Image: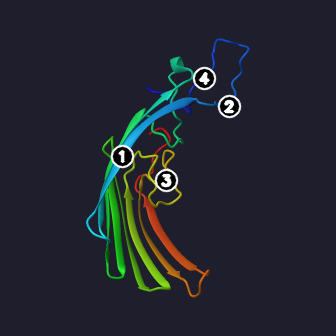
């Protein structure tokens, strides 16, 4: 039976009594090799469709014999190889702008974000959005909208939500913003999951 205790990577020699256990920040503790790309097709002035993909490989530069790993609160996944592939698009229909994107991580977990912006006048804007991030979605480079609740080091994971915003600009250099963001964590992970 596995021991259920909080552990971190050991980076010192346990057999050397002159070294005591301390928390340290180590410069250049790991390396990352990342490559990827994006291709976007503009069908006209207001409509676009894009594809983005990347892959990353991390490697620890210290204490390799101790089999170091990222902590559960780190934004990096435990698996040293990770990445994502996704599509995105957007169009404008009169005073309404529609944008969205969907993505799969290399481990097969999904995420999707959609937003509609309505501009009835030059001084007013209404935005509505929805999002879904799978519990195990591993993309530390995602910049999509999310709440500040973290699951295993990432905010863009394990949540579904909707967003509504009203922006009013009555005069230049003044902006009023009202925002409602309702979300739920899909699964409550245990510490030892």
Q: Residues within 10 Å of mark 4 (few under 14, many from 20)?
A: some
Q: Marks 4 and 3, how far apart in space?
A: 28 Å
Residue 46 location (% of width, % of height): 32, 71
Look at the picture and state if 156 lies above or below 12: below
Q: Tag 1 or tag 2, which sits nearer the N-term? A: 2
Residue under circle 2?
A: 23
In the rendered structure, which disc, 1 or 4, sits on the residue that comes first in sequence? 4
Q: Is residue 8 above or below residue 182?
A: above
Q: What is the distance, in whole Å, between disc 1 and disc 3 at their CAs?
A: 23 Å
**What residue is shown at x 45% (from left), y 64% (from top)?**
183
Task: Identify the residue under disc 1.
Answer: 37
Residue farthest right in this picture: 18
Disc 1 secondary structure class = strand
> What is the C-alpha distance between the residues marked 2 and 1?
37 Å
Q: Few, some or many C-alpha atoms within 10 Å of disc 2 (few <14, some 14-19, many ≥20)?
A: few
Q: Which residue is at the front of the view, 152 or 169?
A: 169
Circle 1 packing at 10 Å, graded few (<14), some (14-19), many (20+), is: few
Tag shown at residue 169: none
Query: Image quarter for residue 91?
Result: bottom left
Q: Where is residue 169 drawn, in percent x and y?
A: 55, 83
In the picture of the structure, the residue carrying the numbered disc 4 is 11
Where residue 56 appears, as percent x and y from the top left, is 41, 37
């Amino acid at each position: 039976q596995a021991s259920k205790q909080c552990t971190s990577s050991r980076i010192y020699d346990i057999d050397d009594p002159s070294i005591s256990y301390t928390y340290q920040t180590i410069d250049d503790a790991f390396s990352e090799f990342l490559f990827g790309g994006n291709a976007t097709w503009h069908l006209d002035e207001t409509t676009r469709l894009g594809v983005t993909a990347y892959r990353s490989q991390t490697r620890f530069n210290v204490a390799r014999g101790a089999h170091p790993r990222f902590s559960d609160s780190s934004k990096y996944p435990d698996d040293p190889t990770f990445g994502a592939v996704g599509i995105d698009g957007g169009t404008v229909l009169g005073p309404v702008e529609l944008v969205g994107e969907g993505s799969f991580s290399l481990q097969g977990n999904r995420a999707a974000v959609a937003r509609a912006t309505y501009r009835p006048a030059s001084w007013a804007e209404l935005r509505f959005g929805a999002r879904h991030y799978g519990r195990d979605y591993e993309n530390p480079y995602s910049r999509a909208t999310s709440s500040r609740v973290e699951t295993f080091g990432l905010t863009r994971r394990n949540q579904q939500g909707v967003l509504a915003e009203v922006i009013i600009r009555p005069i230049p250099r003044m902006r009023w913003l009202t925002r409602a963001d309702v979300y739920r964590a899909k699964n409550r992970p245990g510490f030892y999951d």
